[in-house]
Amino acid sequence: MTDIATRPAPARTGQTEFIAMIAMLFATIAFSIDSMLPALPEIAAELSPDAPNAAQLILTSFVFGMGLGTLFAGPLSDTFGRKPVILAGAALYCVAAVAAYFAPTLETVLLARLVQGLGAAGPRVVSLALVRDLYKGREMAKIMSFVMMVFMLVPAVAPSVGAGIIHFAGWRAVFLAFLLFSALSCLWIGLRQAETIHPEDRRPLRAAALWLGLREVLGHRVVLVSIAMQSLMLGALFATLSATQSIFDQTFGRGDEFPAWFALIAVLSGSASFLNARLVMRLGMRRMIARAVLGQTVFTAVMVLLWWEGAWSAALAFPAHLVWTISVFFVCSLIMGNLNALAMEPVGHQAGMASSVIGAVSTVVSVLLAVPVGLAFDGSPLPLMVGVLAFAVANLLLLNLLPKGAAKAAGH
C-alpha cells in the first residue's frame, strides 16, 4: 500500500480551465432554474389556470429533488470516485428532462423535475468535493469565489435563452436545452479532468461506515452552524427566485422586460464573488460573512419599513425593488463560498460525505422555508421582503454561534 505522505497529489488541469469546468457543472443548476422563469406564465395558463402561483413549484420541486439527491451523491463518490458519480447523475438528469418534455399535467412535470433535481445533485455536490480534493482553506475559498463569479453569469443569459426557446418552440423545448447543456459539460469533464480520489482512499459503501461518517461530520459545531446559515441564505434566494417573475409582471407591469432586468441582476450580483476573491485572503472568511449578513439585515429592514409606510413614489418603487433584489443575490454570492469552505475545512478527509450532508440538509430546509414565502405573493413585494428579513435576522443571531477558533483555523 502506498504511504499517503509519499503518494502523488491528484493531477490538476490548469486553474483557469478547472474554474470554468466546475463553474459549468454548477451552472447546470442555475440554467435548470433560471431559464424556466419566463415560462412560468405559460405553464400556469396551460397547466394550472386556477392556481397560477402553483407554477412556482416548477422551480422548487427541482431544488427539493436536488437536495434529496445531495445526501447520496457524496458518499457514492467517496466509494466509486468523483467522475463516475458526476456522469451517472447527469445521465439521470437528462432522462428526467425528456420525461418533463412529454409530461401532460403539472403534477407529472413536477415529478419529472424532482427526479431531474436528483440527477443534478451528482454534478453539483461532487464538483464541490472535487475542488476540496485539490484545494483547501483560503485557497479553496478563492477558487470557489471565482467559480461562483462565472456561475453567476449564467443567470444573466438563462432567462433570455429560455424566452428565445419559448418564442420559437414553446416552453417544453427548454427541457431539450437542458439535455444539450448537460451533455456538453459531461463531455468536457470526461475528457479533461482526471479522477481526484485515489483508489486506496475510497470508502466502502457500508451502512455502519456511513453512519459513523455522518456522526463525525455533524459533530463539528462549525459544520452545524454553516448548514443553518446556508439554509436561511438559500431560503431567501429561492423565495426571491420563485416570486420575482410574478412581481416584475403583476406588480410593476414589466413582464416583457424581465429577461433583461434579470440579466442586470445576475451580472451585478455576480461581481460579489469577484469582490470576495479579492478580500477573503486579507479579511478572512468569518469577517466577510459577518459584514455581509449585517448589511443585508439592515438594508432589508429599511426596505420593509419604507414599503410598509408606502414611502415610495410610483417612479421610485420599481428601482427600489430592483436594488433590493440585487442585494439578495449579491449577499448570497458573497458568502456562500465562504460558508462552504469553513464547513469543509475540518472534514476534508471525507469531503464527499461532508459536501453531501451540508448540501442536502441546507437545500431541503431552504426549500421548506422558501415555498411558503414565495406562495405568499399577493401582488406586492412586501411578503417576500418580510420573509427575507426574518431569514437575515436569524442568520445574524447564528453568526454569534460560529466558533471563532474554527474560523481562525480555517483561515480567518
Image (cartoon, rainbow, N blue to C red):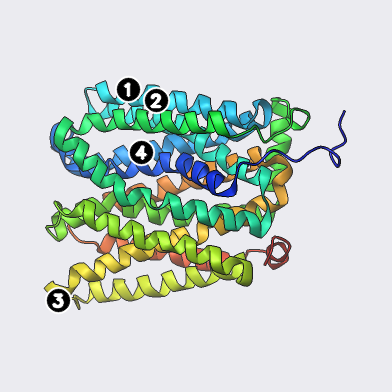
Q: CA distance from mark 3 to mark 1?
A: 46 Å
Looking at the picture, which amino acid does disc 2 mark? Cys
Towards the viewer: 300 or 335: 335
Task: Check residue 129 in the rendering and tell me which mark sits there, or answer none.
Answer: none
Work out whether mark 4 precedes mark 2 in sequence or the reverse, and give the earlier one.
Answer: 4
Q: Are marks 2 and 1 in contact (CB under 8 Å)?
A: yes
Residue 295 at x, y = what percent?
44, 73
Find numbered disc 2 in the image and state the secondary structure of the residue it sits on: helix
Work out whether mark 4 precedes mark 1 in sequence or the reverse, and give the earlier one.
Answer: 4
> Vertical placement of 182 versus 260: above or below?
above
Task: Check residue 98 in the rendering and tell me which mark sits there, or answer none.
Answer: 1
Residue 302 showing in the rendered view: yes
Image quarter for residue 306? Answer: bottom left
Q: Are marks 4 and 1 in contact (CB under 8 Å)?
A: no
Looking at the picture, which amino acid does disc 3 mark? Ser
> Vertical placement of 52 versus 136: above or below?
above
Towards the viewer: 178 or 104: 178
- Whether residue 198 sits left or right of residue 13 in the image: it is right
> Vertical placement of 62 versus 111: above or below?
below
Q: Quadrant of the N terminus?
A: top right
Q: Which residue is mark 3?
A: 313
State which mark lies toward you, 3 or 1: 1
Q: Which residue is found at the position 13% from the left and 37% from the top?
A: 45
Q: Which residue is mark 4?
A: 32
Q: Are marks 3 and 1 in contact (CB under 8 Å)?
A: no
Q: Which residue is found at the position 56% from the left and 35% from the top?
A: 71
Q: CA distance from mark 2 to mark 1?
A: 6 Å
Task: Check residue 94 in the rendering and tell me which mark sits there, or answer none.
Answer: 2
Find numbered disc 4 in the image and state the secondary structure of the residue it sits on: helix
Q: Are marks 3 and 2 in contact (CB under 8 Å)?
A: no
